[in-house]
Image (cartoon, coloured by chain):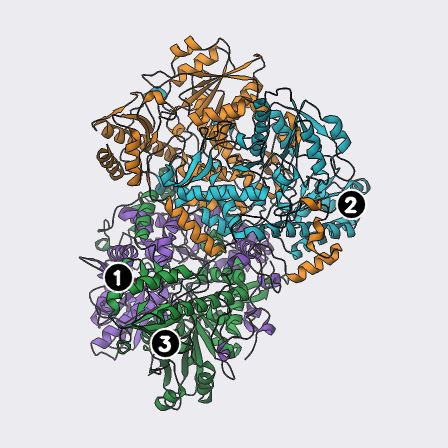
Chain colours: A cyan, B purple, C orange, D green
Amino acid sequence: MPELIFDLSRKGRCAHAQLPPNTLQNATDIPAELLRVQPAALPEVSELQAVRHFTRLSQLNFSIDTHFYPLGSCTMKYNPRGVHKAAQLPGFLQRHPLAPESHSQGYMACAYELQEILKSVTGMRAVSLTPMAGAQGEFTGVAMIRAYHHARHDRARTEMLVPDAAHGTNPATAAQCGYTVREIPTDADGNVNIDALRAAVGPQTAGIMLTNPSTLGVFEQKIKEIAAILHDVGGLLYYDGANLNAILGKVRPGDMGFDVMHINLHKTFATPHGGGGPGSGPVAAGERLAAFLPTPMVGKSATGYEWLTAKACPQTIGRLSTFMGNAGILLRAHFYARLLGAAGMQRVAEFATLNANYMLKRLTAAGFNAAFPKRRASHEFIITLKKEAKEYHISALDVAKRLLDAGMHAPTMYFPLLVPECLLIEPTETETREVLDAFVATMILILKEMQTQPDKIKQAPQYLPVSRLDEVAAAREPEVVAGQEVIEHA
Amino acid sequence: MPELIFDLSRKGRCAHAQLPPNTLQNATDIPAELLRVQPAALPEVSELQAVRHFTRLSQLNFSIDTHFYPLGSCTMKYNPRGVHKAAQLPGFLQRHPLAPESHSQGYMACAYELQEILKSVTGMRAVSLTPMAGAQGEFTGVAMIRAYHHARHDRARTEMLVPDAAHGTNPATAAQCGYTVREIPTDADGNVNIDALRAAVGPQTAGIMLTNPSTLGVFEQKIKEIAAILHDVGGLLYYDGANLNAILGKVRPGDMGFDVMHINLHKTFATPHGGGGPGSGPVAAGERLAAFLPTPMVGKSATGYEWLTAKACPQTIGRLSTFMGNAGILLRAHFYARLLGAAGMQRVAEFATLNANYMLKRLTAAGFNAAFPKRRASHEFIITLKKEAKEYHISALDVAKRLLDAGMHAPTMYFPLLVPECLLIEPTETETREVLDAFVATMILILKEMQTQPDKIKQAPQYLPVSRLDEVAAAREPEVVAGQEVIEHA
Amino acid sequence: MPFIPHTQQDVAEMLSVIGVDSIDVLFDEIPADLRISGLRDIPPALNEMALLRLAATRAEQDSGKLCFIGAGAYEHHIPAAVWEVATRGEFMTAYTPYQAEASQGTLQVLYEYQTMMARLMAMNVSNASLYDGASALAEAILMAMRLDKKNKIHRIVLPTNLHPHYRDTVHAIVRQRDTELLAIPFDAHSGKITVEMLEKMMPDTFTAFVIPQPNFFGVLEDIDTLTDWAHARGARVIAVVNPLAMALLKPPGQWGKKGADMACGEGQPLGVPLASGGPYYGFLCCRTEDIRQLPGRIAGRTRDTHGRNGFVLTLQAREQHIRRARATSNICTNQGLLVTASTIYMSIMGATGLRDVALTCHANARLLRDKLKAVAGIRCYFESAYFHEFLVQLNCPVDGVLTQLHKKNIQPGLATKTYYPELGECLLVCVTETKTPADIDYFIQQLICAM
Amino acid sequence: MPFIPHTQQDVAEMLSVIGVDSIDVLFDEIPADLRISGLRDIPPALNEMALLRLAATRAEQDSGKLCFIGAGAYEHHIPAAVWEVATRGEFMTAYTPYQAEASQGTLQVLYEYQTMMARLMAMNVSNASLYDGASALAEAILMAMRLDKKNKIHRIVLPTNLHPHYRDTVHAIVRQRDTELLAIPFDAHSGKITVEMLEKMMPDTFTAFVIPQPNFFGVLEDIDTLTDWAHARGARVIAVVNPLAMALLKPPGQWGKKGADMACGEGQPLGVPLASGGPYYGFLCCRTEDIRQLPGRIAGRTRDTHGRNGFVLTLQAREQHIRRARATSNICTNQGLLVTASTIYMSIMGATGLRDVALTCHANARLLRDKLKAVAGIRCYFESAYFHEFLVQLNCPVDGVLTQLHKKNIQPGLATKTYYPELGECLLVCVTETKTPADIDYFIQQLICAM
Ligand SMILES: Cc1ncc(COP(=O)(O)O)c(C=O)c1O
Ligand SMILES: Cc1ncc(COP(=O)(O)O)c(C=O)c1O
């Protein structure tokens, strides 16, 4: 592993071309007791050292630009460079978020059009772009559901229903909004257990959080029945849009009966994940909830685009970020949508689904077990290595690490929690058949290795900068900043 | 090694977002006999495939941004990113070379200022920016010398003198200009052998091509004497500016007596080498030769900047490129110079020289042999492994390859040709002392390995994507394009 | 078919492997009455060439302004190397580093970032980012509530000279729980929070006290006094700071006798462009002992099976994908790429560079402030110490002046009337190192014309 | 000290290792009377912030033009991915791949480039680039001279409808040798080279015949007839072509019965921005049997000690650093990065994409041409087949029209009077795929106003 940037530091070194002209610098009239005494121990390096250090670090990553990355639930598709270039234009980068509307019509036109596109795609009535990732979108939606019930003076609804297959952000969000989470079990075919759902609902039910297709990689067929069950007891439906890639232009959450949803633009709309973010999670709402959307939104009048704030939206749940969300990501999503057009969006779902079903078929033909063998794959699917774990003592984790050695990013492991030793595989529509075939071939090889050289799997990865890392030790005695000793304590 | 891009190709695949709208495409009225029948077998790949392929290829390179690169004579210093960003501004990238002057004042201001800066740095009277690399600069200078003699109706001068240490482009250029090349030997201390020079000059002498400091890494102390010898017989002096980094702001070729010279902007002025180019080799000329400079140049009048073409420069040797040279590189060099200012340029020479002398001292202290032990290093220096080759049968090439394994680019090997088993080492001013120390430490390690595990050196590189490549086989039966069979012969 | 690599032959062969006739069949589990045949109201596809031209036109509309607005987002010079390196494909197109061995680049960057941010704040530990400044404050408050085992009702003291958008965000996020958010007014003369006011208005016990430095008006608070006052009452202190300013000003870890307990804020000033308000990133630092309540991802150093150093995401048991409803936060995707850029920015600038930038901002602000004071009809509203932003009051309606200056492509500052009508015709003006003396003179000259 | 990392301590310690007191002493071998104390007339150092602002101002001055000039440099859409990837540090900041094992990225790119260029030209082999189109032609002529063992005096036939700057460059470079450059005039009616003219004016034997396709006027030559005519006289044919056009037009390797012997030209249309004329790159392809006379670097495939595929610079014995005065050329640094970009461009566009672009250029040119013809006072000078550029004659002075249109930020084309006064008030107009119907209409409308 490379040195830390701090190890490259030498007292007095710096990137001179970056310093401001020091004509005025010492003219501070700030009282001494408000000033810092000792400078922060930031690295003192030259510009070349910084460039070289971080360039080399970057090369240690797998990424879409370098590797197949079939990480289920994450939609690691190609991030078009044209979109990136468009969003990086100086005019966009330089606009202050509080610039007057007259200096903002270019940006606002893009944001407004994105709102319209997302309305069309979701079948919802209105869209707010401010949430900054999927989880904040969820928060927004659940807070809106809560605001809706409260607005109707209905404060008895204390429970949020969440299927056991749900992503962890769903229960965490419900809890953060003050709800008690009630889990709904999944039946053998990957659907929500309708009987259990019926048994769970009541006047205490605020709503349900669902994704469809679910994180199990299958489409919830009884979705209209579910919607009816909820609506009949006065509950509302939240749609987790993480899997929208599977159904773009094919079926719309609004039509399924959902009241509110988020869209992960960093998944379906191809904005880069940035090694963990930024994302963007716009929220779309139907009739019941549109009035509660967070501000600001962009409206359009005869004279141009205008900001809609609390004044125009008296029932809004308010503001969720300092300004207007992850604007740069919104621009990217808008530009991506413009490159696709309506037909292109449909194709996304079609080819993502084609790729997933093809892989599923080939892997099961090769002897792997699908978690839901009777079902079609959506844009992703699950195989379970329960059998292999028993027979060869090879876990899903082992297989994941072995895939890394083969130059492929591992699928999502151990999620959803209810399927033992599972791999959630999402190829996305932008990968070629040859790449899918290469992945399948590697999996077949690994299956053989389980019998012939299991150590090769157990000891993987061997060809990466580090071998398996001790996560337990890391959590037991966390070392999360370097050289604690140099921190100046108060 | 990665597959070839052609191996990723599938019939009918393409990067759809890049296609022009096909509204008008079939409206060709070009006669059939002028049209291509079979499409060229270019790769048919998706945009992601192309991005991934070339991104991965890039990772196989050493580069300044990733490695120490002490390649003598090449001045591999940091290429400032700010300069790159400035030169890539859309206004610069979009300007057509034949745009009217009224639409070109921004670019021309930069070019004009660069001419002025180069005049100051070289001590010459005028500068033309058009030559596209050092070798074209040499061609320009020698063609100007020829034009000068011809203008004086002196057609008897058929010889160009070149020291035996010179870079290959010097004799090649002289020959390309129709001159017979006469080599001048070097004396034991790395200077031009003055007696031999005296013996060589005469009425047949067109001039001499010299670098100073020379490619031997030492300063030619008798330069004024040399100039006098040449001028006395009516010959002129060409200065090869490849080593200008060593003397920037310290001493000027114009003052040494040179009549014309080029400057490798891609060395001294920090423009990136691009894996082999582009470079830029502006030519500066003194009194005698200024009138012969190639066009176009930029002039300045009361109304603004204007192009100086053959009309304004009747004695010009003419035009050496379709437009005005490698404009983008000229912009970069100009911006770099603006970041440095006069003091910054002097520092370049000072710290490049400091780094070289420091390394030389440490390496000789460790037992390596300097080619010219009595001399100061300029910005570079030579060690000779003659002794090691004899004792341990380890060649300069072996050491070079072993350095690659240690994560450092090798110095220039086997150049200049007159020093056996030589390494020409140029650290540049932008490298830290720690990096130099690490290089020295590796060299010391290699010296030990010569005694203890010579195979480790002989078999290097072991940690790169390929081990030593068979250059002889490559040249014997050249395979320079893939899949010859698919080429459609006439 | 933008971005889809399938040839017709691929499709045919893949369908035959699956055993279906058409792609459409793959959607046969979806109830037919739900399926739609196409999307409406979506403009037709553009190619990249047309898109870039459209984008250039749009970007052009908003560009070329001379900006003196701050109010939470600050225009700074960003070395070109920062984003050139941060947007390398390997950083930009990677996911969250769940497979640590294949993500050491991102993980080491996070570890280095955490170290830098902790050092800049003089705090023990930092997480690997939250969404933005306002939501980071909300998370800090929720964290303080989790840490407060004493009080039944969680009272949070939020001064009214905290950025109004931060206050709004905190309200929207925190009021989902049973909390009291107590607004403490600022001193009308100094623009600061005073102990007198606190003693008069605040209850004896409360969970946390939020102290902005500088506050919304650019004014510097008496952080030592305020911190000690809160600590004396058993409350936690949450510092909301401009991180760039901390290179010059006393950092939260050194406030008062014990230092602030948490430091949070907006990371944007450290290498992130204005970009219409995002993506930025929120930072949050705390004491070592509180780390298990710290929300968001954290990178940690560990060893591999051969004993070599390496990095992983650690303390994941706090997070939603493991702890689900009992997680410290629901945050999952954070603002990783911004943190990468910020880490490169801080590396290139170093402590001296950051301090020089902060000093230059302050000096430039002082220059403009002095010149504004000399203009008839303008007065500085508060005469307290400030960083790089300050409030001026005009003797005429701000709106008219704004309109005129906007026509000249000058953004002279933020009108505060919407937020603080009681302050009258005021403008919050900010100057950073990006402004030259000529810019400042031009501003003054145009302002005089417009008044 | 921009870009210099040395601390004061470093300097002191390094000097003491060397055993000198000051850096100045290191220059003590330079005669004292030559040393200067400083440089004059160099503007003071700017920091990067100020530099970027200066650069933006300069770039802004020249931007926002609607360009209909071609004449050897063509505005095309370049996919954003091309330069994003080409300017990655590993490509951009590497040197020539002399250490092959540490340069496989660049070397494989060169090998792929050579293959693509050879295929596009339908020739056997390609080098790895020369400086630009004009100098590549000069090198091709020198190569033909080396290959011609029959003729004592090397005569080269250069038509006058070849780009005037190419002719100038060839003159400047080739006239250093004993050569005759024969100018053959074009047919005044068609704008083409005709066999009649050739038979009338040309000597019986000559070394090479240079055939441009399209020629400077955008007109397409009868390449089959011309090629066969030259071959019948034992001369070599050097094709100078627009490489993008070769996706649509018959490529040099297929001209006449035996194909052209060399193909060269300007690589710029394949993914390189206009950028004030450079850096572009020259390409040069030839027959396999002539490869040892091909100037410039060449990458070749070989094997490593384990038998794995790999790439090296090959046939270096032709080059100056080995053969010195007897090298095939003095070229050393070439235009590697441009070739990298071009290789990515060709990969992304593919054969279909390139052909579609060429077709769209042609169709757009046809559209504008037809509209121009309908304007009173304008006629098309030649009625021959054309690619994407054509000559129109005005019934009024071109200069006045240009001045007016330049004021409207339109560059309507190149006035040819400087080069061809005999053609009168002519404008060489080019249209590429970048122009929309609206652009074309705007051009026509403004032109009518200006005439
Ligand atoms: C199913 C599902 N829901 C919600 C989320 C949360 O989205 P985000 O990470 O954008 O906050 C994710 C992303 O990991 C997800 O996969
Ligand atoms: C001493 C010397 N002279 C001339 C040259 C030729 O310069 P260029 O490669 O720019 O043509 C070089 C570059 O390698 C060199 O090192």
* Circles 2 and 3 on the same chain: no
Q: Quadrant of the C terminus of chain A?
A: top left
Instruction: Check disc 2: other Cα within 10 Å, few if <14, some if 14-19, many if 20+.
Output: some
Q: Can you identify the residue that label 1 sits on?
A: D404
Q: Is residue A142 above or below residue C261?
A: below
Q: Which label's residue is closer to the chain start, 3 or 1?
A: 3
Question: Can residue B358 be seen from the camera position used here?
Answer: no
**Which of these two is toward me, A240 or D204?**
A240
Label 1 element class:
helix
Tags 1 and 2 touching, CB below 8 Å: no
Please give the residue where the numbered disc 3 appears in the rendered image.
D162
Q: Quadrant of ligand 2?
A: bottom left
Q: Amino acid at mark 1?
A: Gln
Marked residue chain, label 2 = A
Q: Is mark 2 within 8 Å of ligand 1?
A: no
Seen from the viewer's position, the closer of residues A145 and D205 is A145
x%, y% of residue B281?
34, 62
Q: Nearer the viewer, residue B99 or B213?
A: B99
Q: Is residue C379 above or below residue A56?
A: above
Amino acid type shown at disc 3: Leu
Question: Which residue matches tag 2?
Answer: A373
Cα separation between marks 3 and 1: 29 Å
* Image quarter of residue A257: top right
- On whether disc 3 and disc 1 are found on a single subunit, the reply is yes
